[in-house]
Amino acid sequence: MIEDVRLSQEEFEQIEDLAGCNYSPVQIAKYLSVPRVDFMAAYNKPNHLVRFHYDKGQLQADADINMKALETAKAGNQTAMQIYFKQRDQVKLENLKNHILFGGENFEDE
């Protein structure tokens, strides 16, 4: 029988940190000594706190990297500028696809 995963605030923060370092949910379950089946059942529920903190950790890491890349681009680094513009165009395309598929609202990963 699958048990609901009960974690402390510190463990949720560890999920964020590990997700930001690109650890998989299975690896995080092992790190936290939580049964893989239970952890994955929680992770696969879109509104579960495990999934929220995992996604938040990845988003925060991406944001930190992108902010540093933007600083480098603003300082005149041509490679950083190219990466920035490519990423911006990818986000615009994804937003346009979401607008077409879902209407006036833009939905990401939902």
Image: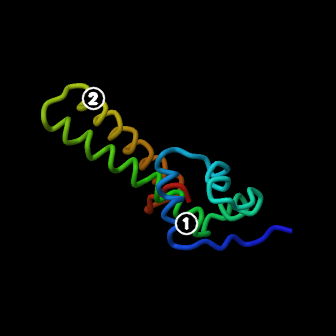
Residue 108, x across and y down, in percent: 49, 55
Does 11 sit left or right of 77 as displayed?
right
Does 37 sit left or right of 63 as displayed?
right
Please tell me how crowded label 2 is: few (under 14), some (14-19), or many (20+) other residues with Cα within 10 Å.
Answer: few
Please give the residue where the numbered disc 1 appears in the rendered image. 11
Quadrant assignment for the N terminus: bottom right
Q: Residue furthest left?
A: 75
The CA span between labels 1 and 2 is 37 Å
Q: Residue at x 49, y 58 (%)?
A: 16
Instruction: Please tell me whether mark 1 sits on a helix, a strand or a loop.
Output: helix
Residue 39, x across and y down, in percent: 69, 61
Q: Residue at x 19, y 42 (%)?
A: 71
Please give the residue where the numbered disc 2 appears in the rendered image. 82
Q: Which one is in front, 90 or 19? A: 19
Whichever of labels 1 and 2 marks the residue nearer the N terminus, that label is 1
Give the amino acid at mark 2. Gln
Q: Residue at x 54, y 64 (%)?
A: 52
Give the amino acid at mark 1. Glu
Does 29 sit left or right of 57 as displayed?
right
Q: Residue at x 56, y 59 (%)?
A: 110
